[in-house]
Amino acid sequence: MSIFGMMRTSVSGLAAQASKLSTVGDNIANSSTVGYKKASIEFSSLVLHDHGGKYSPGGVESDIRYGISQQGALSFTSSQTDLAVSGEGFFVVTDGQGQSQLTRSGAFILNGDSELINASGYKLMGYSAANGTAQAAINGTAGLESVSLNGLALTAQSSTAGTLSANFPADGAIVAAGDLPSANAATAAPTAKTSIVVFDNLGREIVLDIYASKTAAETWEVAVFNRADAAVGAVGSFPYGTAGSPPLATQTYTFDATTGELTGGSPTNISIPLPNGGPLVLDMSQSSQLATEFEVGEIEINGNGPAGVSGIDLDDDGMLYAIYENGARVATYRIPLANVASPDMLKPTSGTLYGLSAESGDLQIGFPGESGFGTIVTGALEQSTVDIADELTAMIEAQRSYTANSKVFQTASEILDVLNSLKR
Amino acid sequence: MTLSSGLDIARSSLSVNADRASVVARNIASVGDPDASRKIANQVTTDLGGVRIASISREINVGLFNLVQSSTSDHARDAAIVEKLDLIQQVVGEPNDESSPAAKITALRDELLRYASAPNQPSSGASAIAAARDLAQSLNDATATVQRVRAQADEDIRAGVERLNTLLSEFDKVNNEIVAGTRENRDVTDSEDARARILTEMSGLIDIRTVSKGDNDMVVLTDSSLVLYENTPRLVSFNPTTFYDATVTGSPIYVDGMPVTGTTSTQAAQSGSLVGLARVRDELAVTTQAQLDEMARGLVTLFAESDQVGGGAPTQPGLFTYAGAPAMPAAGVVVPGLAGSIAVNASVDPAQGGDVSLLRDGAISDPGNAAYVYNTSGATGFADRLLGLADAFGQAIAFDGSTTLSTSSDLISFSVDSAAWLQEQRRTATDNETRSAAVLERAAISLSRETGVNLDEEMTLMLDIERSYQASASLMSTIDQMFEALLAATR
């Protein structure tokens, strides 16, 4: 019994070491695959019950382990669409047929439909941010769609808010009522002027002329006109349109004589109706009235003209921005990460993908940076976790072990031979 | 994990060193360029070891750069003023110059005195008339030169405004490129150098100030806060005038619809060559012309002939006549352009068929009219008129205040003061120009020292990079040997 047992035991040993050699082979073959997690074999003993004095050899069982939760090294590339997860979490990708999968392989490029596909041909999925911040369905993939930059061309936004801060000269001369810019006469003599470029609903550029005139001590009138209405050919721009027609907007500001800032009762902004756009609310609360000449401090107006997409940018929190030719950044998608309770128990499938199994736990979806999820790094790829030196060492060990097991089999076979030749 | 990751790290080190070497090569290539700044490659470590280049930035010093801009503006303004004043001074002359109108006025008086000592000598009379003609000619020439300088300044302003508009549109292109590149995290340092160069050239034309916005965007304003560039360039406009005489006023320069030069400007520009040229055209040359016109008016008034017989005949211009004759110019008020039209009366000029003796006897304004004859006895030795004229050179005349000189002085003192005034203006302008040139040079040298490329530093850095590259390469070969040993064990 024990000789046959010895043969069976050595066969189980051979099978186990063969299994280990196969994992070594697979690992070495995938040592450069982006997002690959190495496979290994753990052995456990199989024990048979012994009968008083006579030893019954059992065997060895092998268990396949995948080091999926191990973080691979990041190598940086020059492509902005190469993504890598640093920490826990997986990209959610789809094959276009509706099935979503998890992967760590992030070498994405734009295909013909402007979707992001990785080296295995799977498309990245995310939540559309076109209508404000995206909401994640926490435990399912509902609501995810493939990220596509198609149809994002040519948006225009009207200017609606801005900041303009200026210093009004405290020692300026007071302008007579008939010469105020708001009277819109050819004799208008404003104290100072500045101009800003804003956009209407269709993305047309509108130049607004802003005139500041002192009407009384510590009181200033700001009048806004559309440059397009300026008088042509005359000296200076007044009158805008027909003489006496009102400006686009007027506002009176009063300053405090001791601090030089706007008084509590004074309005701090001016609302300008734009032709086919706006209204534009200009915040002038940082303006002052000090004894120096007219100076413009800060000019920041929102809004942009029509332009096409020129590139993409991914933020730390997973927000994918489309960058337009005129420099505007518009949030298009939010890329989530998926995680499971036990990533090591996921089932690897072809294409560097991982599928859910009974032991891995249910899917959780969250955004990069939240607790329990890692971050997405742009311009980097996650290298394979295989170390060739380790694998070669394991290979030597497995080979020696295999040889030893085969020696055991050979010995058992010779012993049986001896037994057989006892009776001819 | 160790040998393979060691190999990865060595690989990343090699590629980073290659990038750094290329940045050093760019710096060395731009060593002679005064507008190029030093580029620096910023290296950061990554997770799990390894390095990468995070960004490429340029060495800047904002304070020095602004100082270079403002001193460029000042120097350009002073240089423009000095150049034009030199041209004017060549004809108006210095106080001691024989060719100046001041010297010729004194010469005329001396000729009159000589004629008075020998009134019966026609040759003395002829030389007096010649001196008068010389004086009138020099006043005409001075006027023509002053107006020509004004026209030249106007033409220079036109060319400057055109250049400024071209620079603004170039600035637009470069600025848009910088903003787009910054948003996409590209290397925009070369474009930033180009933008700085454009700003420096613009500051030579008109004084500018910049305000930074988000994403490396920039707003360009004049010092008086008129917008030159904000998202789009604003128009700088100017109406050129081709022909100038004393009555023509030049148009102001408009930035964004508001005037920056001239009396109507509330947000006037203070420096830059355009401002210097406008100051010459509208102030200095106009004042010089007013002084010449007042000198001419003084001559006409001095040599006027009044009624001698009490018949109520009006005073008329005598030896010196002008375009408005026979009416006399109003007292104490400048007549623009008088110095350009002043001439010796044809009736007394022998070159035009006149009679020299009328200078001694009177009736130059109307030969044959007894009302204007001073020599009633008809004697050839009559010297009273001549002596009276010579005396009048020393009598006070009321002058217009717009000449900025004394409102009441005699003609000779006035003419000397005028030449002295111009010399003073020119001396002040030259002093200012020398001083602003020195400031500009110092500022430019400091800026270059702070932000420019230093060949020695770059070569030292190159050695450092080379050693680093060698170390990484030997690390790679060591790891390779370790792999070899391992593979040998499996044979």
Image: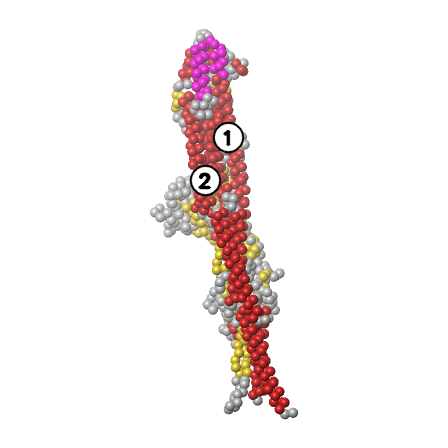
Q: Residue at x 52, y 52 (%)?
A: B23
Chain at numbered mark 2:
B
**Image location of residue B472, percent across then percent down:** 52, 59
Q: Residue at x 57, y 87 (%)?
A: A3
**What residue sits right under mark 2 in the picture?**
B441
Kind of residue sitting beneath label 2:
Glu
Most extreme residue toward the right, as rendered? A424
Residue B119 part of the magenta segment? yes
Which secondary structure lies at badge 1?
Answer: helix
The residues colored magenta run B102-130
Chain at numbered mark 1:
B
Q: Is residue A209 visible?
A: no
Main SS of the magenta segment? helix
Which secondary structure lies at badge 2?
Answer: helix
- Against B92, is A132 above or below? below
Asked if marks 2 and 1 fall on the same chain, the answer is yes
Which one is in front, A315 or B234? A315
**Image location of residue A306, percent across then percent down:** 56, 53
Which one is in front, B102 or B470? B470
The colour scheme of the drawn protein is secondary structure
Location of residue A141 (image quadrant): bottom right
For the residues bearing labels 2 and 1, Cβ distance under 8 angstroms? no
- Against A54, is B96 above or below? above
Q: Earlier in the sequence, mark 2 or mark 1?
A: 1
**What residue sits right under mark 1 in the picture?**
B149
